[in-house]
Amino acid sequence: MSTGEKYLAAAYLVLFGAVLLYIVLIALKLSRIERELAELARLAKEQSGG
Amino acid sequence: MLLTLGLGLALLWAPEDADQGPSQRIFYIHVPVALTAYACFGWAAWKAFRLLWKGDQRADLESYTAVHMGVIFGVLTLITGSIWAKISWGVWWTWSERQLVLFLILFLFYSAYFMLRYSTEPGPRRARTSAVYALFGAVLLPVSFLAIRLADQLLHPSPIFTRDGPQMSASMFLSFCVCLAGMLALAAALYAIELTGKRADASLRELRERLA
Amino acid sequence: MSGYLADVTALARKDLLVELRSRDTVPAMLLFVVGALVVFHFALPDDSSRLAAAGMLWIALLFTALLALVRSFVAEREGAVIDGLLLAPCDRSAIWLGKTLSVVAFLIFAEAVALPAFALFYEPVSWELLAAVALADIGIASVGTLLGAMAAAARARELLLPLLFLPLAIPLIVGGVGATLAEDPARYLGFLALYDLIFAILSWASFEYVVTE
């Protein structure tokens, strides 16, 4: 494997890593939103009940 | 949404086999990423324009998201461009590569955009201010492009290398187009995801305020 | 139209009068720009070229301008003058034009000292440099005034303005240094004029959106 190919692989890896990282971040955000939503739903139920 | 993402990835990775010299192949990711970043900034400016002209409040988040995407792709351009510079000229950074310098300026500019947004109270004024700044970005882009050309001529009176690019063969051009389409699809998908996320965030906050 | 012009001159005169009374911006700018030129002498090695000196002059001018811009909006903010101005029955863009004119005046004051000092310390000032400085002043003032109004709404406004301004000032520096050093300064002067035209129109048109609550 020549150095050129190595750098090429690095470039592709960077791109792939960025996309992967982004997906992870999105997943984290989604779970946070879900948690908050559950909390709010609970709050709403309490208010309408009480 | 995920389907679009998958499609984008599939399109993106498929032409890897189109055989070129190894160092030339980085062209297929560097240039589409750069063009996608331009497209994002352009889209951000268009949304900003709509916000100012039509008073469309939703355009604020859309413009913000587009800038967000543009910065991500801009950073990727800087990284891949830097790798390209390393392959071609043996250095990680060269000031004579105009594209890279332009992206550095844009990166500084749009980082300031984030600073502006974070340090201003949310509200219609922030929306308008950021919109004006995003519009400035779209104008700054060609102006700095011209400036870099001029500065280049000052620093290097005789061009050391011209990068008009070798003539592309049909197959190269085709795979380049596929790459570009894939990258744009990827950007559009990420943009849609990010936008939904931001909207959900905003409505959650509103809901919380109403309940509390 | 004459009413518009009267508003503009009244606003610019207001800024100049305030400065004349309080004298807290222009003396600081003068000291700063001369101080910067002296510091640059020590920052440059003895045998560095005249090219480096020209670059340093432009950096000094740019940072002095930043000083003026930050000051000009801090004053408005402290006295809540801007709220009064917004209530006044004049076109919003007239506020921008008035402020830009007053900033240009401040810059000219500072350069009236900086350029002779540069000629004394480093090398004579050419006509091209004078023209480039004049053109750059217009660009700096028009963009800077708009960004100053933007930053005035933010929390860390003294910090934010340089961040917002520097990327936009890069073309000005390119044009200015080019006009000072190149064999054909006309192209660079033309570029500066183009920059002024584009950004002045853009700032003029968008100022209203930035200041209204």
Image (cartoon, coloured by chain):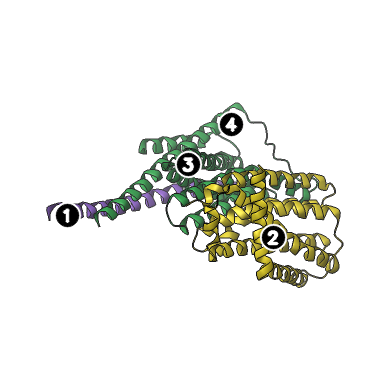
- Numbered disc 3: what chain? B
Residue C16 in picture, x, y percent from top left: 68, 62
- Label 3 sits on a secondary structure element that is helix
Residue that label 1 marks? A47
Badges 4 and 1, same chain: no
**Residue that label 2 marks:** C62
Q: Amino acid at mark 4?
A: Met
In the rendered image, residue B106, in percent from the top left (x then y), is placed at 59, 49
**Which labelled disc corresponds to residue B51?**
3
Q: Is residue C207 above or below residue C166?
A: above
> Toward which corner of the image does residue B169 lie, by quadrant?
top right
- Amino acid on which disc 1 is placed: Gln
Say whether marks 4 and 1 touch (CB < 8 Å): no
Q: Is residue B197 visible?
A: yes
Tell me if label 1 and label 3 are in contact, CB under 8 Å. no
Q: Which residue is mark 4?
A: B172
Nearer to us of marks 4 and 1 is: 1
Residue at left 64%, top 42%? B142
Residue farthest along the left direction in this orientation: A49
Residue B18 versus residue A45: which sits nearer the camera? Answer: A45
Chain letter for mark 4, please.
B
Residue type marked 3: Leu
Where, quadrant-wise, is the C terminus of chain B in this rendering? bottom left
Which chain is in yellow here? Answer: C
> Which element type, helix, strand or loop, lies under badge 1?
helix
Tags 3 and 2 touching, CB below 8 Å: no
Q: Nearer the viewer, residue C111 or C87?
A: C87
Alpha-carbon span between mark 4 and mark 2: 46 Å
Q: Tell me the kind of residue under disc 2.
A: Leu
Instruction: From the rendered image, report the letter of the chain displayed in purple.
Output: A
Find residue B173 and name its label: none
